[in-house]
Image (cartoon, coloured by chain):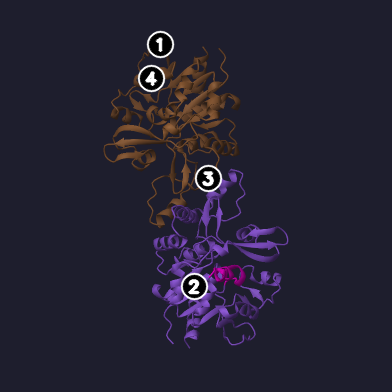
Chain colours: A purple, B brown
Amino acid sequence: MALKNIVVLVGGVGGVKLAHGLAQILPPENLTVIVNTGDDFWHYGLRVCPDLDTVMYTLAGLVDKTNGWGIADDSRAMLAALRRYGEDPWFGLGDQDLATHLLRTQMLHAGQRLSEVTAALTSRLGILHPVLPMTDAPVRTMLDTVEYGELEFQTYFVRYRWQPTVKSIRLDCIEQASVSPEARAALERADAILIGPSNPWLSIAPILAVPGMSQLILSRNVPRVAVSPIVQGQAVKGPAAKLMAELNYDVSAQAVGEYYGDIITGFVYDERDTALNLNHKQVTSFDTIMIRDEDRVVLARKILHWIEE
Amino acid sequence: MALKNIVVLVGGVGGVKLAHGLAQILPPENLTVIVNTGDDFWHYGLRVCPDLDTVMYTLAGLVDKTNGWGIADDSRAMLAALRRYGEDPWFGLGDQDLATHLLRTQMLHAGQRLSEVTAALTSRLGILHPVLPMTDAPVRTMLDTVEYGELEFQTYFVRYRWQPTVKSIRLDCIEQASVSPEARAALERADAILIGPSNPWLSIAPILAVPGMSQLILSRNVPRVAVSPIVQGQAVKGPAAKLMAELNYDVSAQAVGEYYGDIITGFVYDERDTALNLNHKQVTSFDTIMIRDEDRVVLARKILHWIEE
């Protein structure tokens, strides 16, 4: 089969690497990136969308490659000045980064939908591939923790460096959310739907939980392939492995594949892992650890070839 | 007579120098600075109060001494990032400066009055002297210009570098403004009211135009003394002289003194000027050009001594 239109669902750093690889081999009209917005929050009056920002900065070639997020060589003068006012800012708002948040906040206050705002920002950064928030509605990923009770995502993730023990996850306001017209159209014309190696519980589950999203994906009789973020029982980056253990999952690619259930028809795990088996699903293994920029393209190409065959 | 409580009315740079001189010789309980807010505006969703900021940064010792406004050694990374988004930002929002605007905007959106917000910000910067906006209501100084029609103050002042020819000045929304309780209390207990060498038409007139303000000042039977911003027919800084000519005033300290009319009982002009005469008013001349920090203290001390005698 010849794949034409690809949709990839991603959260932050891990999934974005795959999206970046895909963007380098697929023209803008053939790739749409749908991004988790459960991490979005208000901070000092600004609407901050960390996953959208990571996608934007990566696709625009602006990203800080060491961190995988934020803008390269950004400064922190505003944060230093906040400290002079006695504030204790715990979220890394870079000075260049602030321009994004200021423009976004202003457009949202003017009544634009987040999809429209994101289209404007990406276009102005020269990004040609559509980047879509999972929904235009505000949804908050909340983590119930042993140590601090329920925490907003960024408080858990950045302020407490994902060290609290998670008991459960709740998506605040998810019932008021809906799939945007843009995301619906992209999924309806997709020839394949990919799920990047992002955190299944924190990054992908919020996307799939948008009312109508899972039904829409399940209704598409096309290859639906997830890439494991777990390699040899460890997360490539971030809290995925720790969280799986806390939620009483086996920390393995196998458990990730099982977690996605019917949403996927195929699963890519890392070639370092032992062979796994998911009933009625196609599975394959590649080198999924993307260190260099070229690794992203290589993995994206391998996945597309595998799906085509 | 022994002066105890001093109130000084100021706009931006010129008047602030005198306020700074006064703050160095008067304890916090004896000096209140009332500041023009007609220059305030919304910019990229932030509430920017240039005159309040200049007072705050000067009294906190943070000000950029070369410009007389902004924070010393501030960077402009956010502005550069806005340009990457295709914006053409014309107002000098420094990165450190942004912390002020973000905190202020957040507090205003939370329902605090500008007087309360300013008290919080100044206190957190270690400023002990009360700094009060002329009113809590938003007032906009609008300039009708030959070249561009009516312009908001900062558009005239910063974007067009006060080059347009002014036909008239209007204070938008002034009728909804009122003297704040804090400003009223300060003026009611003042033993002397000073008007700094700020632009009489652009910085002081908006303060005096707040409904109730002129009546309150006129009702105080205390020395009310203005300092001329015009020296030898020129403005020490900014558009005062150019504006006076455009509004068909004689460009002189004498004309400034006459403009203030009954609001003042005394007038200080520069010793470089020829003697002037204002009917029924006390006049004196000092070196009013404050180059060094010490000059501010010297002038403040001379004015207070003159009033006491």
For the residues carrying marks 3 and 4, which lies nearer the camera in this image?
Answer: 3
Tell whether position A206 is magenta: yes
The residue that mark 4 highlights is: B257
A1 and A293: which one is in front? A1
The residue that mark 3 highlights is: B109
What residue is rendered at 55% in x and 29% in y? B182
The residue that mark 2 highlights is: A19
Chain name for mark 3: B
Circles 4 and 2: CB distance less than 8 Å?
no
Q: CA distance from mark 3 to mark 1?
A: 48 Å
Tell whether position B286 is magenta: no
Judged by its main secondary structure, the magenta piece is helix
Q: Are marks 1 and 2 on the same chain?
A: no
Q: Quadrant of the N terminus of chain B?
A: top right
Q: CA distance from mark 1 to mark 2?
A: 79 Å
Q: CA distance from mark 2 to mark 3?
A: 38 Å
Q: Are marks 1 and 4 on the same chain?
A: yes
Seen in the picture, residue B187 relative to B277 is either above or below; the reply is below
* Residue A240, position as x, y percentages in the image: 64, 70
For the residues carrying marks 2 and 3, which lies nearer the camera in this image?
Answer: 3
Do we see residue B31 in this rendering?
yes
The residue that mark 1 highlights is: B280
Q: Identify the magenta region.
A: A198-211
Q: Amino acid at mark 4?
A: Gly
